[in-house]
């Protein structure tokens, strides 16, 4: 990684390093001195309660809001040239808009007006990218008629179209049922391996994080902990950031083990 300054973090080749990132909006402190790393090729999850500043941190990375501190990427420090694919939590648009999924996907790349139709080459390209997210059946559907889960897949296809080095997702499984969330995470695992991007996602769901993330950043305005799930998601950290005892959830969802929860109630359940 060719950054302007050397980075003294343990990860040998980080995709992103946040260093003392601070965001204030209207005099109110949203993020305070956030220092964390996103290892290259990882599936890094940012977890934290509502209002913790998770989306704000993503927007700082995307260069969409002003911050103090440093964000290191392969471009350098505070430089906005990394190829980032972004899947927002939701897209607000006029549901009556008469546009198909294929037209939506080629909107930014087709040179001739859309009302002349989508060219064969771009239609094939859109079909291929939809196929990669198991959504080829949506090609001719009206955008406004998609369900929340279908829309997430189309937004994922749109983000992949840029061939991102870093794929950023804000609660990709929000609004989906448990099975839908699992399917999208498995799909992301496969895409990450096939395409070699780094994945940075916000998630509320501890089960998803423990099963799919390789690195976790626990955030509540500040970083409470970070590291591999089994090290970062301790009872103490979860209690500190969520304000309630979450250890039982974490221990039940940790693959192959129940090592994180040391609270008496968990010990009892583990012995049942
Ligand atoms: P999260 O994604 O963790 O739920 P956000 O990053 O969306 O949290 O927001 C963190 C805090 O910053 C919230 O209290 C939110 O109300 C506040 N906030 C976010 N954007 C703005 C804004 N544009 N103006 C004022 N406050 C904001
Ligand atoms: Mg958010």
Image: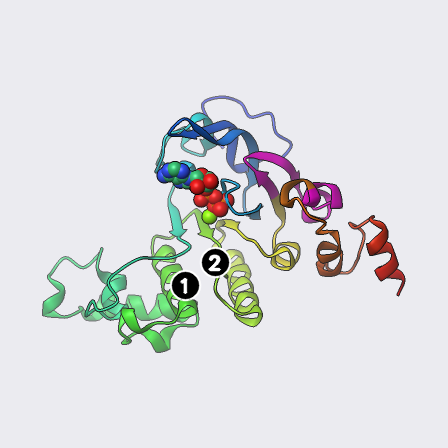
As for residue 230 lying within the magenta part, the answer is yes
Structural distance between the alpha carbons of marks 2 and 1: 7 Å
> Which numbered disc flags the more N-terminal residue, 2 or 1?
1
Q: Quadrant of residue 154?
A: bottom left
Residue positioned 41% across, 67% down in the render: 148
* Residue at position x 57%, y 71% in the image: 179
Callout 2 crowding tier (Cα within 10 Å): few <14, some 14–19, many ≥20? many
**Picture quadrant of residue 250:** bottom right
Query: Looking at this rendering, what residue extends furthest in the right direction?
Result: 271
Q: Is residue 55 visible?
A: no
Between 222 and 143, the one lying in front of the other is 222
Which stretch appears magenta?
217-239
What is the count of numbered marks? 2
On screen, 20 above or below 149?
above
Q: Is residue 215 above or below residue 149?
A: above
Give the left or right position of residue 142, taking residue 208 as reference: left
Q: Which residue is mark 2?
A: 172
Contact, mark 2 vs mark 1 (Cβ under 8 Å): yes
Residue 82 covered by magenta stretch: no
Q: Quadrant of residue 46?
A: top right
Disc 2 residue: CB within 8 Å of ligand 2:
no
Q: Is residue 167 rendered to the left or right of residue 229?
A: left
**Residue extending furthest top?**
5
Locate residue 69 relative to residue 101 in the image: left or right: right
Callout 2: SS:
loop
Secondary structure at badge 1 equals: helix
Q: Which residue is mark 1?
A: 152
């Amino acid at each position: 990684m060719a950054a302007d300054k050397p980075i003294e973090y343990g990860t040998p080749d980080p995709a992103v390093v946040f260093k003392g990132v601070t965001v204030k909006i209207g005099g109110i402190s949203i993020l305070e001195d956030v220092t964390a790393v996103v290892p290259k090729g990882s599936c890094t999850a940012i977890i934290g309660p509502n209002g913790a500043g998770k989306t704000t941190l993503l927007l700082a990375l995307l260069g969409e809001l002003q911050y103090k501190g440093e964000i290191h990427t392969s471009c350098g420090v505070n430089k906005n040239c990394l190829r980032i694919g972004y899947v927002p939590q939701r897209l607000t648009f006029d549901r009556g808009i008469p546009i198909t999924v294929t037209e939506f996907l080629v909107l930014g790349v087709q040179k001739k007006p859309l009302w002349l139709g989508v060219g064969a080459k771009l239609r094939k390209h859109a079909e291929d990218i939809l196929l990669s997210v198991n959504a080829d059946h949506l090609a001719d559907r009206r955008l406004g008629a998609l369900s929340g889960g279908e829309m997430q897949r189309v937004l994922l296809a749109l983000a992949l179209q840029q061939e991102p080095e870093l794929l950023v997702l804000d609660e990709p499984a929000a609004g989906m049922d448990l099975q839908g969330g699992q399917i999208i995470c498995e799909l992301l695992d496969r895409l990450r391996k096939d395409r070699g991007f780094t994945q940075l996602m916000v998630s509320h769901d501890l089960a998803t994080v423990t099963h799919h993330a390789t690195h976790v950043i626990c955030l509540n305005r500040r970083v409470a902990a970070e590291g591999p799930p089994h090290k970062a998601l301790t009872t103490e950290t979860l209690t500190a950031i969520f304000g309630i005892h979450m250890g039982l959830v974490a221990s039940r969802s940790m693959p192959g083990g129940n090592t994180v929860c040391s609270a008496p109630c968990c010990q009892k359940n583990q012995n049942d």
